[in-house]
Image (tube, helix red, strand yellow):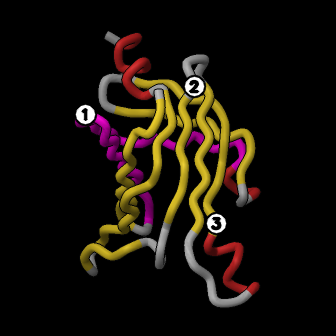
Amino acid sequence: MRVKMEKNIVGTWILKKFQIKNNDGIRDWRSNSHGTLIYTSDGYVSVNINSDFKNNDEYMDSILSYSGKYKMTENKIIHTVTNASLFERIGKIMERDYLIDGNILTLIGKGDFGEAILQWERVAN
């Protein structure tokens, strides 16, 4: 079953929705978020998300990118970060709950902020 799950995740995905859920409710991460997520058959992941920014001071807050290795369990995708836009993410293990429904992949990351809910659409295998 593990091989089948990894084959289902392999491909290129485009960000459709990025929301933060916490005690205050659900809100968009930032204005006009867009991005690409790539999972390879040999266990690599790359994600790059950008959003609108008003000036250079906001630029770094409008970027979320990292790459590294991934592995899957029955209900989690585990990313091991080797490169990142934020230095403190390098070396981190980031677990994501996931759901694949046809060409839609939903990833849920949990932290002190609440939950990050990202919805991706497959555009290539």
Most extreme residue toward the front is: 123
Quadrant hosting residue 38 = top right
Considering the whole magenta stretch, tell me its main secondary structure.
strand
The first of marks 3 and 2 along the sequence is: 2
For the residue labelled by badge 2, is the local secondary structure a helix, a strand or a loop? loop
Residue 83 place in picture, x, y as percent: 74, 45
Is 94 colored magenta in this rendering?
yes
Q: Which residue is drawn at 64% across and 74% down?
A: 61
The first of marks 2 and 1 along the sequence is: 2
Q: Are circles 2 and 1 on residues that touch, CB within 8 Å?
A: no
Amino acid marked by disc 1: Gly
Q: Which residue is drawn at 54% across and 31% down?
A: 39
The first of marks 3 and 1 along the sequence is: 3
Residue 99 vs 69, above or below: the answer is below
Amino acid marked by disc 2: Thr
Q: What residue is shown with label 1? A: 102
For discs 3 and 1, the disc positioned in front in the rendered view: 1
User: Alpha-carbon neighbours of circle 1 within 10 Å: few (<14), some, or many (≥20)?
Assistant: few
Residue 17 place in picture, x, y as percent: 37, 61
Q: Are circles 3 and 2 on residues that touch, CB within 8 Å?
A: no
Label annotation for residue 40: 2
Q: Would residue 4 be found to the left or right of residue 31 on screen? A: left
Residues 74 and 102: in front is 102
Amino acid marked by disc 3: Ile
Q: What residue is shown with label 3? A: 63
Q: Would residue 87 be found to the left or right of residue 67 on screen? A: right
Q: Which residue is drawn at 53% across and 44% down?
A: 37
Q: What stretch is highlighted in magenta?
A: 90-112
Residue 71 place in picture, x, y as percent: 50, 25
